[in-house]
Image (cartoon, helix red, strand yellow):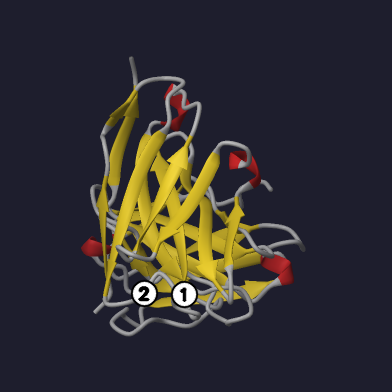
Amino acid sequence: QVQLQQSGPGLVKPSQTLSLTCAISGDSVSSNSAAWNWLRQSPSRGLEWLGRTYYRSKWYGDYAVSMKGRITINPDTSKNQFSLQLSSVTPEDTAVYYCARSGPPYYDYYYMDVWGKGTTVTVSS
Amino acid sequence: QSALTQPRSVSGSPGQSVTISCTGTSSDVGGYNYVSWYQHHPDKAPKLMIYDVSKRPSGVPDRFSGSKSGNTASLTISGLQAEDEADYYCCSYAGRIYVFGTGTKVTVL
């Protein structure tokens, strides 16, 4: 059974970088048949996909247009986990952040079937 | 990429049916048969209810069904039950990115 365990601070100051980690059990971050996503949910914006990383002979990252320039999603194969870094945060980045598994491109698996429990992140001074 | 359009809320009595629409464009909903639906209860992780427009994951009741016509996808909940009260989000693959809907609150009267 695949499980995702999230960790990271719940409070970040404006202009700083938000960093979260998602540890994977029951699957591999390097799997050729999975992609590893970050999403967030807030009352004002609903559920929003932020980006993903996946491995197909090399590492790839795809990001939401609204996040480009501020977001990085990196794998950590030594710890079987992946991370989210969101820079220059503002109070509008306050949300519950989720990690989730989907499929990589061309794998006919375009949905999020396993989710982490969520991390509430507040951006405030 | 703009969010997919969903009604803000729908409601029904126990046993009734409700349908939630999800309208996008030819670049997302209309261009791919990769629409999924997620149920979200407060303080819980979203749960996959429908994938590939109309397929149900194991364990999801057959009261939940999905369909698509053109740029609009729909989720129907038949035989509404109290535990179905939640927020529902549609999602479409759009070529290397995912686009979510604005979300619909389902209220069981």
Q: Residue A16 at x, y = what percent? A: 42, 24
Is the residue B10 above or below the residue A17 in the image? below
Q: Residue B80 at x, y = what percent? A: 31, 68
The residue located at (45%, 34%) in the rendering is A44
Instruction: Look at label 1 and name its amino acid.
Output: Ala
Q: Which residue is mark 1?
A: A34
Q: Residue A80 at x, y = what percent? A: 32, 66
Is the residue A31 above or below the residue A120 in the image? below
Residue at the right extreme of this rendering:
B26
The residue located at (44%, 73%) in the rendering is A30
Residues at marks 1 and 2 touching, judged by CB atoms closer than 8 Å: yes
Is the residue A20 above or below the residue A70 in the image? below
Picture quadrant of residue A117: bottom left
Check if mark 1 and mark 2 are on a common chain.
Answer: yes
Which mark, by number, is residue A28?
A: 2
The residue located at (64%, 57%) in the rendering is B23
Q: Which chain is indicated by disc 2? A: A
Q: Residue A56 at x, y = what percent? A: 58, 75
Density class for disc 1 (Cα within 10 Å; few <14, some 14-19, many ≥20) is many
Q: Which mark is in front, 1 or 2? A: 2
Picture quadrant of residue B70: bottom right
Q: Is residue B100 visible?
A: yes
Instruction: Look at label 2 and name its amino acid.
Output: Ser
- Tell whether B28 sits left or right of A15: right
